[in-house]
Amino acid sequence: MSFFELVNCYPEGSSSASRMALAARSLGYGGIIIFSRDPEKIFMPGAAEKVKGIEVAFGVEASASSPRALKSRISSLRSRYPFVAVQGSSDEVIRMASEDPNVDLLIHPCDSRRPLGIATARAASSNQVSIGFDLYPMIHLRGNRRARWMEALRRNLELIRKFHIRPAITAGAATHLDLRSPRELMALAEVAGFEPDEAREALCQPSRILELNRRRWAGPGVEIL
Amino acid sequence: MIFELESEDTSGLIQARDLMNEIASSQFSLFGDEGAAKNRLRLISFDGRIGLIRFSHLHLNETRATLAAVHSIRGIRAAIRTKGVSGTIKSAREKYLPRLVKLSYESDGRRIERKDISGCIIRTHGVKVDLCPDDRYKSAGSEAQFMGLTSLDLCGGHEDADGTADGL
């Protein structure tokens, strides 16, 4: 299982998809998942697929004005994209995403005022929703704010371990300068509170999700070969 | 540890002292005075792009995390890419420096004109292109000054352009 990184490209970030793919390849990634709120608007997605030696997949970040609208949007996007992520912007969105088996990854904000709840963790575990941790604050924040963020992350990790949820980690890159190599990301994750094996598995989790979603499933547990 | 500094600096503003200040600040912020005292981090050499840093071999992961947490130097967006780790300074130079000296940036004065992106090319390196967009809000979300593109993005650009086959 190779390391995969989740990236935002132009117009949501400031590097093109192919530049991200080149940078990720030189850092040692096996692939990248380019996810965007509107994947149709990604600048030159075909150019990224021309970059040799790295797998490029396109995912979607589902967003809507209300949790109910988000649920119907996720259902409509599921068949079109191999990777569906949800940004946990509010408690309602986090709860809804954890209860929807169509969601692959719920990116939790790690806010000390809004920790991961037991009900949410249990729902995510039973619906096989991975919880993603964006390490962007670990790189870009300093001092008290980073300490608070790390405290919230450690508390969330306790629940992740208790309910056997598979976490994922990402650097939340919006430009090629935000990308970090897998070893650096694992080192940052270990400082933040991950165990070494957990950090390695968390970096492989997006590729595991992609592989599962690319197989043809007739129903839960039934695969068409 | 041999590392390469990738940054938006075009005029050599980043000096070894600025880099070491930023690394030390990152280390103190992550591990505090006690952690910094245990890991005796020293910058041995830095030529503006490639550098060599010495640290206690017991604190490899901490050093990686320290370097990974550096995101800007003197307000210029930057990233430190670790190239390799070795037991002695001599072997680190022998193993990792010969491959790196081939790389070089060239300055550029050309423009890109497309309906969705336009601006001046700051530099090219292989197929990588750094672009200063005419519309500064294009790169505002990531605090970056320049946009990162490749020549693969630019093939089939503006039809009036007298560009080359790589689209520039």
Image: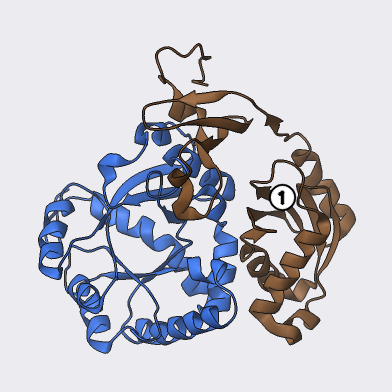
Q: Is residue A149 visible?
A: yes
Residue A134, above or below B114: below
Identity of the residue drawn at 64% across and 46% down: B8
Which residue has dot 1 on it?
B4
Residue A126, above or below A74: below
Write down which chain is painted blue: A
Chain B's colour is brown
Tell me which amino acid carries mark 1. Glu
Residue B102 figure quarter: top right
Residue B101 figure quarter: top right
Residue A50 figure quarter: top left
* Coordinates of residue A102 in the picture (x, y in percent): 18, 62
Label 1 crowd bin: few (<14), some (14–19), many (20+), radius 10 Å:
some
* Coordinates of residue B64 in the picture (x, y in percent): 66, 66
Relative horizontal placement of residue A70, taking residue A54 as reference (left or right):
left
Q: Secondary structure at mark 1?
A: strand
Identity of the residue drawn at 23% across and 49% down: A81
* Coordinates of residue A127 in the picture (x, y in percent): 20, 73
* Coordinates of residue A3 in the picture (x, y in percent): 47, 56
Q: Is residue A174 visible?
A: no
Q: Chain of mark 1?
A: B
Identity of the residue drawn at 41% across and 18% down: B158
Residue B159, above or below B35: above
Q: Nearer the viewer, residue B17 or A1?
A: B17
Relative horizontal placement of residue B162, taking residue B92 as reference (left or right):
left
Q: Residue furthest right?
A: B90
Relative horizontal placement of residue B62, taking residue B51 as reference (left or right):
left
Q: How many marks?
A: 1
